[in-house]
Image (cartoon, rainbow, N blue to C red):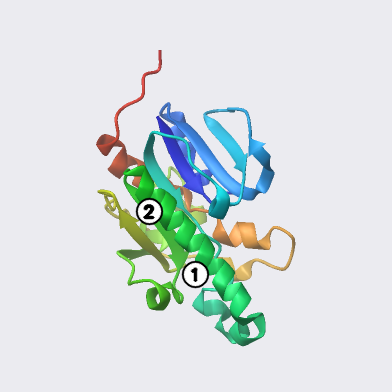
Amino acid sequence: MIVLSLCDWTGVAVRPWAEAGYECWIVDTQHRAGVGPLRDGVRKVGADVTRWIPPVPVRFAMAWPPCDHLTISGARWFKGKGLDSLADSLRVVAACARICEATGAPYLIENPVGTLSTYWRQPDFKFDPCEYAGYLEDPSGEAYTKKTCLWTGGGFRMPPKRPVPPSLGSKTLTYGPGPNRKNLRSATPGGFARAVFLANVKASPVPSLN
């Protein structure tokens, strides 16, 4: 009963699934190389998704490919980055799409508003974190905006919104420079992760806890 999350360093996206008894694999080049031990329902896999074959069967899949060279907020640096950076980013997105589609499971692929709509296709859904913060006991930390796009398939169900006022504004713009800035900006909102789980868990077989 594996739930797969690609390009995932934090593991926030899989927490609700792990708590429900699913085995979750989070795959990212920042994890130690290879398949790690199962801890609290989660395995960290250090691998490059462009050269990685997933386990089977997969009951739900997610992908969060890096947006460094694709997001509109970084458009001013596009020319300086060159074609290789763009090609590398698109190669990761393509690998995520290929893996997700190959599982046959419901899936989502996430990226901020950017150039994927041009190079690939229009997203199926868009959301701001504050629109799902109401799924948290304390929504105050996610009362912010960050327009995010989703490309979905396999019968994915978009969860209903439980919005709160965006009192924090565009919070991600406040992160200062540092080694973890990229990971902090790209971390999955906990409210959205919970909402996705609740909307899609019924479409996946319930794992045996015996």
Mark 1 neighbour class, 10 Å CA radius: few under 14, some 14 to 19, many 20 or more: some
Where residue 38 appears, x then y in whole percent?
58, 27
**Can I make out residue 175 in this image?**
yes
Q: Which residue is mark 1?
A: 169
Residue 16 located left or right of residue 155: right
Distance from the alpha carbon under mark 2 to that under mark 1: 25 Å
User: Residue 5, which numbered label?
Assistant: none
Look at label 1 and name its amino acid: Gly
Answer with the quarter of the image where residue 207 lies: top left
Q: Secondary structure at mark 2?
A: strand
Residue at image point 45% right, 30% down: 19
The answer to whether 67 is drawn above or below residue 187 in the figure is: below
Q: Which residue is mark 2?
A: 108
Where residue 100 appears, x then y in whole percent?
40, 50
Q: Nearer the viewer, mark 2 or mark 1?
A: 2
Residue 180 located left or right of residue 204: right
Look at label 2 and name its amino acid: Leu
Which of the pair 172/154 is nearer the observer?
154
Where residue 57 appears, x then y in whole percent?
38, 33
Mark 2 neighbour class, 10 Å CA radius: few under 14, some 14 to 19, many 20 or more: many
Q: Secondary structure at mark 1?
A: loop
Between disc 2 and disc 1, whose residue precedes?
Answer: 2
Residue 142 located left or right of residue 161: right
